[in-house]
Amino acid sequence: MNRSLILGALLSAVFVIAALVSFVWTPHDVLGLDIPNKLKEPGGAHLFGTDHFGRDIFSMVMVGARTSIAVAVVAVGIGMLLGVPLGLAAAARTGTLLDEVIMRGNDLVFAFPSLLIAIMITAVFGASAVNAIIAIGIFNIPVFARLVRGASLSLWTRDYVLAARVSGKGAARISFEHILPNLTNLLIVQGTIQFSLGILAEAGLSYVGLGAQPPTPSWGRMLAESQTMFSFKPHLAIFPGLAILLTVLGLNLMGDGLRDWLDPRLRRTKR
Amino acid sequence: MLRFVLKRLLSLVISLAVASVVIFLFVEVVPGDPAAYMLGMNAQEDTLAALREQLGLNGTLVERYLSWIGGMLRGDFGTSYTYRTPVAEMIGERIWISLPLAVYALTLSTLIAFPAGIWAASKRGSLADVLVMGFTQLGVAIPNFWFAMLMVLLFAINLRWFSAGGFAGWDAGFLPAMKSLTLPAVALALPQASILARVMRSSLLDTLGEDYIRTARAKGLSRRQALWRHALRNALIPVLTIIGLQFSFLLAGAIIIENVFFLPGLGRMVFQSIAARDLIVVESVVMLLVFAVILVNFLVDVAYAVVDPRLRVKA
Amino acid sequence: MSLLQVENLNMNIHGIPILRNVSFGVKAGEILGVIGESGSGKSMTALAVMQLLPVGSVATGRVSLNGHEMLELDEEALCKLRGNEVGMVFQEPMTALNPIQTIGRQVAETILIHENVSRREAMARAAEALRRCELPQERFPLSRYPHELSGGQRQRVVIAMAIALQPKLLIADEPTTALDVTTQAEVLRLLKRLAQEDGMGLLLITHDLAVVADMADRIVIMRKGEVVESGPCPAIFSTMEHPYSLALLEASDHQPERAGHVFDAPLLSVRDVVRDYALPRESLFGGAKHFRAVKGVSFDIRRGESLGLVGESGCGKSTLTRAILGLEEVQGGEILLDGEPVFSGKRPNRAVRRKMHVVFQDPYGSFNPRWKVSRLVAEPFHLLDAPPEGREREAAIIGALEKVGLGAEDADKYIHEFSGGQRQRIAIARALIIKPELIILDEAVSALDVSIRAQILDLLADLGTRFGLTYLFISHDLSVVKNVTDRCLVMQAGEIVEEGVTDDIFERPQHPYTKELIGAVPQLPEKRQA
């Protein structure tokens, strides 16, 4: 175990716990308006202050964690679920038409950043949190497919794969018995990184109105709503922004820490 | 080398063709009748028919696609339904904000990232390395639009060094125009620079462990000379990949950042068009941005070949 | 006075002792061979002379090079000596050159770093250095990139860089280990010639006694960071006393005792086998081109026989191996095992494949690191229609491990807990578990130290006798093939150029290529009569 792993895991855990707790309890109701208490500075009954409708910002940050984490988890899930098998298949059939089609498809999707996908979906179907999930998820597919294909190709040249072929095993069986287990570390690390990128992307999409819609609280939209007021009420922007920063920082530290911890090469040199 | 470039050029054209089909199908076919979609529920039958005529929706799918593509090749992107002006004209005005912003940010991030990455790698484990790694860790995690808001708070509202938003216009002169793009460019560049600096550092550390560095040291080169003469150019190869990949994030970031600073660029235009259901504008801007991403990846491929002689023969 | 004098050199890396009281000397014009197996500290000794030690190393004692006290000089002074008074050549020519600089520029850099000359003059002198290393300008212009050269040619470039300034001492660390035997002979001849012409001291580090026996003036034998014996060459071969030196000498030319019965009937027949590979297409519309890796090869292996297949890299022996194993379809001819084709109807033939298995070269890459030994060894059961289960399976695994000298307790371990030699034993156990008749040994002992190699060869010979196994022994190492096979095939450019009884081939080679190959093998001096 190393310091970045512990620090990162702790930071991420804070937000995951906040999101989970928000299902059963928040200090204040996030949907009800409380105009008399609007734009309160932090302190007293409202730890992070209140917004222009008098809603408690601390509670909204808690519920916003839920939105961010849910969007990012599902998007990474989509990316892994589709990207990993595609990458495995491309590597198992390298040089064939299947490989070529998968890789060119990947290149094509890479030309569409999630923001553009979200713009297209929103223009046609209207805005929603599901759009954000789909847009970020689609962008994650080629990320995992490429990663898995590249790493698998080098594993396919190992003699243990050759030994498995001599033992009569087919490409699919080898992919699942020999290739995939040796990719888990890589997938855990990349999954963490894509998770943090997903949180950032969700915040960006919600900020420009392509993500979660009112009244669902979301960090990105809280920042968008603070836009006209943050010059004289900075707390409106500070807390949701810090929440994004710290969650992403925590996940990145965890990713780095996991990489060092899981990579036996690094561990050996450190010992 | 020429052969390599031609080959890449061919794959660029193919990518563009496929991407354009995807965009066309999604925007013009998935909604059913785009004209009805754009006008909403209460449209009159004769306005609908007029719009269909104007959009050229009466032909077959293939005819419509070909006329769309043919128009774009001639610089005709159609006419915006809401603004009643040619889309090409609208893009022509706004691109002179978005494009300089992206280039400004890319330049800044490269200028910051390269020295920082090289410095950290050459002094691995030192205080300098720890500082660079710590700052970049923060830079990677910060959402750029939030960072932009913080900078507005500090530099525009408290210190009053910059205006909080808006664009001075190129007519006002180069420097004032650049000044109004500076805060947005910095907001875009710093997170990018953080990623790039980290990649530069780790790539350089990898190449410094290669056998040919040991060979160079055996020839009598100092650690520093080996780094500058042998490691750096080899380390650029993965850095180029990241620059290519980052460009699409940069474009997306620019669209978002324009909203923070009320810059009348492509980003603002596209969000207004979404609200107004102006599919023609959305379609054109998306196509243009996809073109930019594919073009940059082509340039990165060519840059690879310049750096690495092995690629000139292969691929 | 010696050119290089190493006295009581001690070295630790992060507190772990690597070298202990190492002392030796090299005179001008002398060739000193340093011999040792992996972990002997021979490469670290070289790096200590160059003062290019890894981070965290502490060296004490004395290293005096041409009057310079290397351990006391600062980095700047050392940079002035490296490349100028002492040059170094490394083992792996494929990675030793900067892939994105021309060879001319890399050789000229040695000159530009040390002397204040124009780039043009440096290039002219680089051309001269390359010519001395047998890379004349007409065929190998300075504008070549490393990837355009073969391994042997790259090693010549590295040598040219090291000798461009005619240093007093050249250190060569396993300079020919990664090369084919004929290339090895040429590079060794080149090194010897350069040392003579320039009156240069040569410190030649290798694991191969035979390599130094041919050319060294003196020999130092190292083991676990210490010098165990040293003396003039070749006299030392008849005077050596230290048990380790004697064991090393014996292992270097080890002849396992074999006593199997060879039947007349062929077990494996290879008939006119042709194997083509599609080359990457050059243009989008042109037809695919093919490379013919195996060009109509025919041979038989008789039951109980041990057949050698020798050839240099790229000769097609690996391709042939894959075809025999039924991994790839052939484009012509047929491969029959016990009368049945290994590949039938576009699919590998499971019933036939059960009768053979394989042991690969790399003891580290041959096993999935996430599996336990029991699962690894049992993998070939996949070929059986009704693989044993439960206790029966366990008994089979333990039986296979015991046959190769391991125990039941090893079944629950992971592969990283074993040494290279033990891993090769596990690979043999994996091959034995389905009781095959033919075992293909694909460079199976090439990556092992000589003493471990001797043990594995003994084990194979013993198993062959006990279970009546047939071996196909594929190797680039002729000295091993000579000692363990009954018959031998010589392969060159996809064809079998010579075939016969092993002893006949080695004593009376007929084909010019076979003669060249055998002539290139470094020889140990005749063994001391017991």
Image (tube, rainbow, N blue to C red):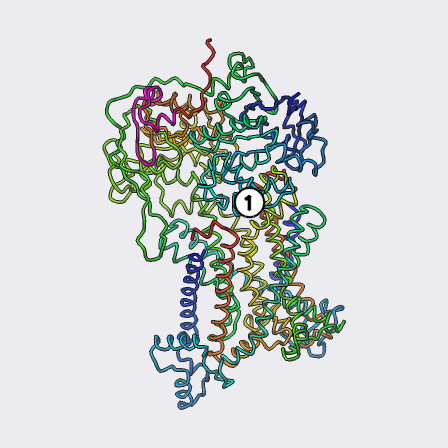
Q: In the rendered image of this protein, does residue C418 appear above or below residue B197?
A: above
Q: In the rendered image of this protein, does residue A80 appear above or below residue C376?
A: below
- The segment highlighted magenta reads C492-518
- C84 and B223: which one is in front? C84
Neighbour class for label 1 at 10 Å: few (<14), some, many (≥20)? some
- B153 and C499: which one is in front? C499
Q: Is residue C187 left or right of residue A205?
A: left
Q: Is residue C493 left or right of residue C139?
A: left
Q: Position of residue A269 (x, y in %)?
A: 61, 39
- A216 and B173: which one is in front? B173
The question of residue B218 being in magenta is answered with: no
Q: Quadrant of the C terminus of chain A?
A: top right
Give the letter of the chain under mark 1.
Answer: C
Q: Is residue C507 left or right of residue C159?
A: left
Q: Label 1 is placed on what type of residue?
A: Arg
Q: Quadrant of the N terminus of chain A?
A: top right
Q: Position of residue C113 (x, y in %)?
A: 63, 42
The question of residue C495 being in magenta is answered with: yes
Q: Is residue A247 visible?
A: no
Residue drawn where x is 33% and y is 24% of the image: C306
Q: Is residue A66 visible?
A: yes
Q: In the rendered image of this protein, does residue A261 appear above or below residue A50?
A: above
Mark 1 = which residue? C105
Q: Position of residue C323 (x, y in %)?
A: 31, 38
How many numbered callouts?
1
- Quarter-wise, where is residue B26 in the image? bottom left
Q: Position of residue C343 (x, y in %)?
A: 27, 40
